[in-house]
Amino acid sequence: MSCSLRPVERAHRGRVEALVRATGLFRPSEAETAVEVLDESLAGEDDYRWLGAFDGDTLAGFVCWGPTPGTEGTYDLYWLVVDPARHGQGIGTQLLSDVERRLRTDDGRLIVTETSSRADYEPTRAFYEHRGYTRAATIPGYYTPGDDLVIYSKDL
Ligand SMILES: CC(C)(COP(=O)(O)OP(=O)(O)OC[C@H]1O[C@@H](n2cnc3c(N)ncnc32)[C@H](O)[C@@H]1OP(=O)(O)O)[C@@H](O)C(=O)NCCC(=O)NCCS
């Protein structure tokens, strides 16, 4: 069942933080960062754009992306998070596809996203790889010794 896609609003701050925490993948400080970035966007900052996937009134997932400073037509995908109880139902694909569609109509050329080499990110890496993203670069030991930064990109 597909969700309806619409803006994330102030009322969803707590839910955004809870969803980031619920993945079990991110540090607590990253959940706080997500809410801070949402606040900046709601205050009119255009560097970060948000879209929520809603099941009725419930935020089931969200995506946050924005233009990469100093580039022409390159965009960073900062967050893509789906409620773990709803993984595998197509919500992440729905959100990602909609961002790509928006970027194509907005002179977007390249989309870049960063993830980790950790084993618990294997489903995340598979998700991107199955959706046309290629592993563009790796920085060994970036996060911690043995935990590499893995950068994916997709030519739109
Ligand atoms: C990655 C993520 C956004 C995918 O969202 P989703 O709604 O589960 O994805 P979809 O249902 O659209 O697609 C399922 C695909 O995702 C992959 N996947 C990733 N995690 C999964 C999970 N826990 N359960 C089922 N499928 C998962 C599967 O490999 C599947 O791939 P396939 O269709 O090519 O076989 C979601 O799993 C998530 O929030 N993960 C934690 C946060 C994260 O890693 N975000 C990305 C970096 S910020």
Image: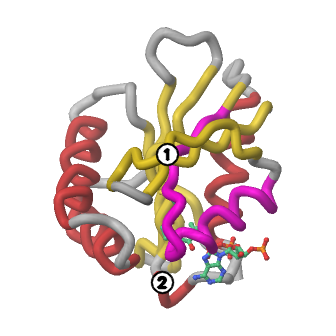
Residue 112 is covered by the magenta coloring: yes
Against 109, residue 145 (above or below) is below
Instruction: Tell me: is circle 2 under 8 Å from ligand 1.
Output: yes
In the image, is 97 to the left or to the right of 85?
A: right
Mark 2–mark 1 distance (CA, rounded to whole Å): 28 Å
Question: In screen coordinates, is 128 left or right of 79?
Answer: right
Is 72 part of what is drawn in magenta? Answer: no
Give the total of numbered labels: 2
Which quadrant is home to the C terminus?
top right
At a point 17% along the width and 58% down the height, the residue shown is 29
Q: Residues within 10 Å of mark 2 (few under 14, many from 20)?
A: some
Residue drawn at x 82%, y 50% is 132
Stretch in magenta: 111-131
Question: Which residue reaches farthest bottom?
Answer: 85
The image shows residue 138 at horizontal and vertical percentages of 58, 42
Q: Which residue position holds label 1?
A: 140
